[in-house]
Amino acid sequence: MYLEDNKLTAPDQTRRFHTRVVAQHRLSETGYELILERDGLEFKAGRLIMIHGRNVTEDRSYTVASGENDEHLHVLYRYIPTGKLTPQLINLKPGNTLEVSGPYGEFIIRDPARPLLFIATGTGVAPCRAYIRTHRDLDLTLIHGARVLDDLFYRHEFAPYKYHPCITQENGEAYRGRVTEFLKESKIDINSHAYLCGAYEMIYDVQDLLVERGMPAEHIFMEGYYYRLDM
Ligand SMILES: Cc1cc2nc3c(=O)[nH]c(=O)nc-3n(C[C@H](O)[C@H](O)[C@H](O)COP(=O)(O)OP(=O)(O)OC[C@H]3O[C@@H](n4cnc5c(N)ncnc54)[C@H](O)[C@@H]3O)c2cc1C
């Protein structure tokens, strides 16, 4: 099934509502997971919600990191000290309310029967987590890049798949280097569909690399979250 079909059949109704914080977990030095009441919101795995701040300049998008049938909405986010919204999010406690809207976006699986190559940096792994919690029999290869091991969010949940963690700033049980370096040294199944998510710099580099290796450009899907602050 391709995007056009999904669009035609997409039942998700976009709406804006107040939700309640169920829990907040700190996953690493700067990584957090916010658990929100779902309030019946229907969404396709890979779509996102907007969290509304005090005014529109503080509204930010977050992929839902939980599955289509999960009880709650999970939001995986990184605390950006210089940012506008995330310094507010880290102070949220169970019972606090938050205004959200959604679902938005089209970063959904086009064809769950096809081998799926997912390449993420940092929190860009969120849609992949929604995919595995929704589609049980995925033929998934995940290449996930982060600075340190603790930022390889949900790594234990990805362990049953073909999972290739890459870290740049410490030695550990992972490839030492960027996802682009790992890819250059790896065999790629060009019949896969590729999903790239996270830093724009990685997305552009990986897109070029996959096309050079013979993957048709129309088999590559992308969701950019941010430009790196440290480049
Ligand atoms: C389609 C889409 C989906 C997104 N989904 C997620 C998600 O699931 N989880 C998530 O953490 N963010 C996600 N983002 C980014 C998110 O919307 C915010 O930009 C981010 O949470 C920072 O918000 P802020 O107001 O604190 O800082 P901002 O003022 O928005 O950002 C300040 C700077 O921080 C850097 N930055 C922003 N986000 C990140 C990040 N995640 N990791 C590293 N550096 C970053 C960028 O350089 C940015 O210019 C998504 C963005 C888009 C466009």
Image (cartoon, grey):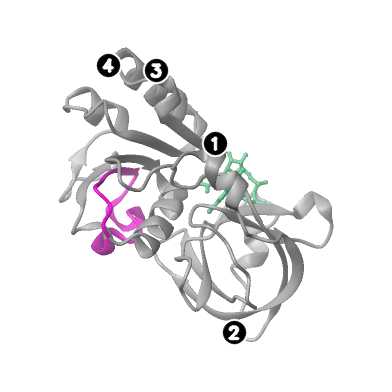
Q: Which residue is mark 1?
A: 229
- The amino acid type of the residue labelled 2 equals Pro
Q: Which residue is mark 3?
A: 208
At which x and y percent is residue 154? 33, 61
Question: Crowding at label 4, few (<14), some or many (≥20) Cα neighbours within 10 Å?
Answer: some
Q: Which residue is mark 2?
A: 94
Helix, strand or loop status at disc 2: loop
Nearer to the camera, 67 or 60: 67
Contact between labelled residues 3 and 2, with CB atoms less than 8 Å apart? no
Helix, strand or loop status at disc 3: helix
In the figure, 175 relative to 231: above or below? below
Does the numbered disc 1 mark a residue whose Cβ is under 8 Å from ligand 1?
yes
Confirm whether the magenta stretch covers residue 223. no
Which segment is the magenta one?
137-157
Structural distance between the alpha carbons of marks 4 and 2: 48 Å
Structural distance between the alpha carbons of marks 2 and 3: 44 Å
